[in-house]
Amino acid sequence: RLHEPRVKRIIEPMLAGTETTADPAYEEDLSYVRDLGLIGRGRYIQIANPIYQEVIARVLTGHIESNINVEPRSFVTAQGRLDFHKLLSEFLGFWRLNGEILARRQTYSEAACQLVFMGWLHRVVNGGGRIDREYAVGSGRIDLRVTWPLPDRTEQWEAVELKVRRQGRPDPIPQGLAQLDGYLDRLGLDRGTLVVFDQRGEPPSLTETASPSGRTITLLQV
């Protein structure tokens, strides 16, 4: 169902965080996808429930995961923590070699970059943790929370925001840092990660910066 044009027209803007189209057929497609039960019947367009939110992402990233040859346990430290900096650093190398090729093969082209990153996360994190997602039409971003269980029965949380920089559009980093501040505040975290897929062809980089409130932010630009 997800690859039907009518379904894709509704789901893709949610994954990409973009605005909906002015196509006259949009309302008919919206009703069709609601009748399928994929989105809720409330005022706002959102995935019907957390299970579908997970399943949709897993279905659309399944073939990406099959192209990722890494050992998830290699990202776990001797103390049992998820080495998130290593996860980001190795994704940078993976993207340089394979990311753009995989993105071009995506049916959901507007959200292709985000789906490649989520496929990488699935491959690494599902060895022991879980991923919670928040995405919606017009938000301009996807928010991800990685939860990793620790040996002392507490949890390690990592918050990630995904954005895309497109040709002719303003730099999304200032807005992304402010949005990430709000997400981190809700989660009670003092640091997070902003991933920006730059479609202008700029060199990839992995650096640190600060959010408007002074939180430490890892900035991955690919």
Image: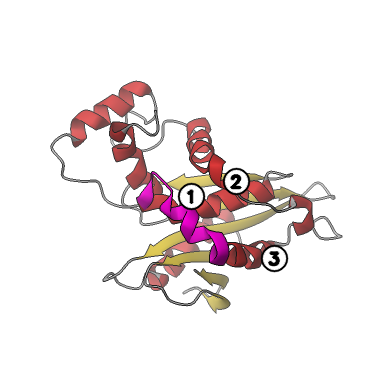
Residue 97 in view in this figure: yes
For label 2, the residue is: 65
Give the CA separation, mark 1 to mark 2.
10 Å
Q: Which residue is mark 1?
A: 115
The residues tagged by marks 3 and 1 sit, at their Cα atoms, a distance apart of: 20 Å
- On screen, residue 197 versus residue 145, left or right, reads left
Colour scheme of the picture: secondary structure
> Residue at point 40% right, 62% down?
164
Per the image, label 2 sits on a secondary structure element best described as helix
Spot occupied by residue 80 in the image (x, y as percentages of width and height): 82, 55
Residue at image mark 3: 86
Q: Nearer the viewer, residue 182 or 114?
A: 114
> Label 2 sits on what residue type?
Glu
Mark 3 belongs to which amino acid?
Answer: Lys
Is 45 placed left or right of 97 in the picture? left
Q: How many marks?
A: 3
The percent position of residue 76, horizontal first and vertical second, equals 78, 56
**Quick check: 99 left or right of 18?**
right
Mark earlier in primary sequence (1, 2): 2
Q: Which of the 4 image quadrants contains residue 3?
A: top left
Mark 1: which secondary structure?
helix
Task: Please name the amino acid that badge 1 sits on.
Answer: Leu
* Numbered range of the magenta stretch: 95-109
> Is residue 103 highlighted in magenta?
yes
Q: Residue furthest right?
A: 78
Task: Label the magenta part by its dominant secondary structure.
Answer: helix
Residue drawn where x is 57% and y is 77% of the image = 207
Image quadrant where residue 33 sits: top left
| Dot 3: element | helix
Q: Which mark is residue 66?
A: none
